[in-house]
Amino acid sequence: MAANIWVFLFFYVILYMGSAVSGTFMPVYFQSVGFTQAQIGGLLSFGPLVAVLAQPVWGSLGDKSRTKNLILTILLTGSGVSMLLYPLHDSFAYLLLIMCLFTFFQTPAFAITDAITLEALGRQAGSYGIIRMGGTFGYAVMSLLFGFYAKEHIGSMFGTFALVMLAGLLLLLRFPKVKGHQYAGRKMQIWQLFANRRLVLYLGFCFAINLTLGYYYAFFPLFFKGLGADNGLLGWSAAISAVSEVPFLLLSGKIFSRVRIPYILLGAAAATALRWLLFSVLHSPYAILPVQALHGLIFIVISVTMSVFINKEVPGELKASGQTLNGLINLGIARMIGSFAGGIASEHFGMQKLFLYSSVITVASMLLFALVAFRRELRIDTGISS
C-alpha cells in the first residue's frame, strides 16, 4: 500500500493542475472574448447547475459499477475532450453548451477520486491529508507557470488542460481496483443519506460558506485584475492560496483526533468572514496577496473534513454517493447560486461591496450553526434523544 500512496499523491498533483487551469483562468478567457460580468456569471453558474444533476448520477454509477476506477476514467476522458471544444466558437450559446458539457464530466471527478482514495487507503486513511497535499502543490505550480504564460497566450489553456487529463488517465492505470459495493451486494438509495442528522447539519453549514465561495471563484480574477493585477499576479495569488493549505494538510490527522468537527467548521467560517471583510476594504492587488493565505483555513479545511467524515459515517454501499452528494450541494448548488446571483448583484453594488455582504452572510450562518450544533450536543450529553 505504501507504493499506492505515492500513486495517489501524484494523481492529486495532476488532477488539481487541471483545476488550476480551468478554474483560475476561465473567467479571464470569457472576458477576453468580450462578455460582461452578468454574462460571465451566467456562464459560470450554468456549469454548477449541470453539476447538480451530474453528481448524484455519477455517484450512483460509482456505487453500482464493477469498479469505481471505470467511472473515473470516463470522467477524465470527458473532461479533456470537452475542454478542447471551447475555442471552436465564441458565441454565448455555444460556450454555455460546452460549459455544461465540461462540468458534467469535470466536477464529479473530485468526489469520485476522494471515494476511491479513502476506500483504498483503508486503515491508512490518516495519510489522506498528505495525499491531498499533492493537489495543493499541483494547483500552486500550475497557477504560477500558466499564469505567466497566459499573459500572452490565454487560449492555450484548452490544450494544456487536455494534456493534463491524459497524464491523469495514464496514472489512473496504476490505481488498485476499488469495486462498487452495490454491484453484487445490498442495494441502497442516495436519499437514505439524509437520515444522518449530523451529515445534514454539516452539509447545510458548508453550503452557506460555499455560497460565498461561489461568488469568489467566479469573480475574484476579474476583481483582482480590476485593482490593477495582470495574469502573472493572478497566478501568484492562486499559488499563495494553494500553498497556504499545506499546514492543515500536514496536521489534519492530529486535528481530527483532538478537535471536534463543529469547531473545525466554525474556524473555517471565521477565516472566510475575515477574508471577505478584508477584500471589501483593500484597494491594492499587492495588499490582497497576503490575505490569500487565509484560503488555507477555508476551502481545504471544509473539503477534507467533509470527505473524511463521509468516509467514516456513510455505509460502504453509499460511499461514492455520499461524496458526490457533498459535491452536489457545495460544488453544485452553492456555487451556482453564488456565481449567478453574484454576477447580477456585482453590477448593481460593485464587486467590493458584495464581498462585504458575503462576510455578513458568513457570520450569520456561523451564529445559526453554533446554536443548532451545540444545542444538539447538549441534548446528547444530557441523554436526551435527538
Image: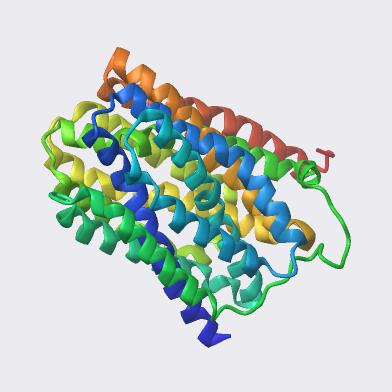
The foreground one among 288 and 339 is 339
- Quadrant containing the C terminus is top right
- From the viewer's perspective, is 311 left or right of 30? right
Q: Using the rendered image of the protein, determine whether residue 320 is visible from the camera's viewpoint.
A: yes
The x and y percentages for residue 155 are 24, 49
- From the viewer's perspective, is 279 left or right of 330? left
The x and y percentages for residue 210 are 48, 37
Q: Using the rendered image of the protein, determine whether residue 136 is visible from the camera's viewpoint.
A: no
Q: Is residue 126 above or below residue 104?
A: below
- Quadrant containing the N terminus is bottom right
The x and y percentages for residue 30 are 29, 36
Quadrant of the rendered structure where residue 250 is? bottom left
The foreground one among 26 and 374 is 26
Q: Is residue 8 above or below residue 74?
A: below
Colouring scheme applied when the structure was drawn: rainbow
Q: Residue furthest front?
A: 88
| Residue visible at 57% across and 78% down in the picture | 175
The x and y percentages for residue 70 are 64, 67
Task: Give the total of numbered labels.
Answer: 0
The foreground one among 325 and 168 is 168
- From the viewer's perspective, is 316 left or right of 34? right
Q: Is residue 163 above or below residue 327?
A: below
| Residue visible at 69% across and 60% down in the picture | 62
| Residue visible at 48% across and 63% down in the picture | 252
Q: Residue furthest right?
A: 186
